[in-house]
Image (cartoon, helix red, strand yellow):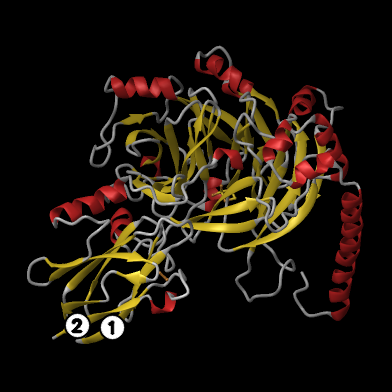
Amino acid sequence: MSEEKNPNETSSAIRPSRRAFVKGSVALGAGVVGASGLLQRENGNSAIDQLLGVSTARAASKRRGLKYEVPPGKLDSYYGFWSGGQSGEIRIVGVPSMREIKRIPVFNRDSASGWGRDDYSEQLLGGRSSGDTHHVHLSYDNGTYDGRYVYVNDKAGGRLARVNCTTMECDAITEIPNSQGTHGIFPQRHKTGLVLCNAEFRTPQPNNGDDLDDPKKYGAMHTAVDGESMEVQWQVLIEGNLDLCATDYEGKYSFATCYNSEEAVTLEGMMAADRDWLYVFNLPAIEKAVKQGRTIVVGDGSVPVVDARGDNGPYVQRIPVPKSPHGVNVDPTGKYAVCSGKLSPTVSVVDIGKLDDVFAGKIKPRDAVVAEPEVGLGPLHTAFDNRGNGYTSIFIDSVITKWNIAKAIEAFNDESVDPIVQKIDVHYQVGHTNASMSETREADGNWLVALCKFSKDRFLNVGPLHAENDQLIDISGENMKLVHDGPAYSEPHDCVLVRRDIIHPEKITPRVGPRFEYYEKLAKEDGINLLTDSKVIRKGKNKVRVYLTSVAPIFALREFRVKSGDEVQVIQTNLDSVEDLSHGFCMSKHDVNFVVNPRDTRSMTFTAGEPGVYWYYCPWFCHALHLEMRGRMIVEA
Ligand code: CUK
Ligand code: CUA
């Protein structure tokens, strides 16, 4: 690797990209010249148009490729929900423009919105301030997204969170007991049912200081959380570790890859065996055991645990697959679960239709594997189109491999068949890849995103910590076409691309849900109507509540008085019902800053500082007199 500045190399690196640029311009020109009525429908960028997409439009797009530029005034066709990795957040990215439209703070503290510091979210987070989000999935109904919830894991904290799509705000966080490294998660797809969560790290069970040095006594939990109540329903204790997670389309099985069937605690130990497993969990059998009380007590016993260590049915089966598998993805027909070898150049295709026979003991677990195509070095995750193809991210080779499922099954018994359709270079070290609607029955084969871990040479040099590179690939034609590079901050792992007609957030805060229950309770205590009253209420010797309404550009209270050392809770209600008209509250020198969206109520609690005058102001530019939207907190000795 030549990191050194070498002028010759620099220029040679520029030349090919220039050529590519010229080529691109020509292609673009041709597209413009060829614009017809049909193309204009596509320019409108409606995914529905593309879907209903009149076969001639599909044929035209095959020749030309899809339109990926979204001109001013036009909307994207897909909501991309990105995990934010170590940032602890979720991001909404418009696809195909790849414009980041919003960040949804979840496990992190956010200076802009006050998330994690305002009273409600601080309670929700229990004072914690960081997380590591990897996997985002939406709630389902009948095999496709129902547009209600987004679930996301926290690998660092062992938690599952939910974002309500009505407001795109986190409304629940659930601690997963007896678990560390909550990694793969997947909701059931037949309806909004369970969200299954995998523990990637094996720990002593219970993890109470006994059995610290006896890895044989370690285990990992496959946990079921109810997607509506967000309460943990049950756990299955298993010997190996659990990495990625998937569910079938029927509500019967869930899957987990296991890269440590060796039950080791060192890297060498975890890589020792040539084969590890795909765990298959039989959900009805597990629920039956829970109902009948065939469970054990682990930890505080608050959650029923089914002990499936060494079980070979009825609860779990282990499908042997090559070396240290990582991703597992179910194709849109619901017939196949595809898991990636990571340390083997193969993906294993498991026929879900054969699993009943595996559980019944009629066939061996390995007999459920119906194909194992060689896709490249370091396969991680697989996405799908609606034409029977898989797209596997290949980490070490830095490519996406497109392969045909039916041909791979043929090739399993006939070496003369080549299931590989195309490999395309990505830059570099691709982790997850996902395609538009790929995780649903409505996969549409339009766009693929490759989430690359390294972006060396791809963007302006910004110092040692580089951006990740999220690349957009047009998969609508026979050949994949790379059309866009998009830098992303720390470190999205996965994303899902959801047709925009499925998601319908409110533009004005609907005053419902647990956050409003919290504020209504406070207001009732104090005899306050949040929508009309502004008032300072002393609550005992050192506690003050300040209820405050705002209408652009004024706070209803131009000043309020407290005593130095008082615990002050400012509860602000934004009375404006105008779309996009957010106010907020920032108290100078007090580390207090939060947003209050149209018709919203939020609060923050702080300790009044040294005696003096402190200006509070509205931090969101809301009006020509926004800068004047302020008042004085007068702190008396
Ligand atoms: S994991 Cu990161 S590339 Cu956490 Cu889904 Cu595979
Ligand atoms: Cu209200 Cu600025």
Q: Position of residue 612 (x, y in %)?
A: 22, 87
Q: Is label 1 within 8 A of ligand 2 (CB to nearest ligand atom)?
A: no
Could you tell which of marks 2 and 1 lies nearer the N-terminus?
1
Q: Amino acid at mark 2?
A: Val
Task: Name the residue beneath numbered marker 1.
Answer: 614
Q: Is label 2 within 8 A of ligand 2 (CB to nearest ligand atom)?
A: no
Find out whether the residues at labels 2 and 1 contact each other: C-beta distance under 8 Å.
yes
Q: Position of residue 117 (x, y in %)?
A: 33, 64
Looking at this view, is 511 or 12 the one in front? 511
Disc 2 residue crowd, few under 14, some 14–19, many 20+, Cα 10 Å: some
Looking at this view, is 135 or 547 the one in front? 547
Quadrant assignment for the N terminus: bottom right
On screen, residue 294 above or below 146: above
On screen, residue 306 above or below 245: above
Quadrant assignment for the C terminus: bottom left
The disc placed on residue 635 is 2
The disc placed on residue 44 is none
Q: Is residue 113 visible?
A: yes
Q: Amino acid at mark 1?
A: Tyr
Name the residue located 21 percent from the left edge and 78 percent from the top edge: 608
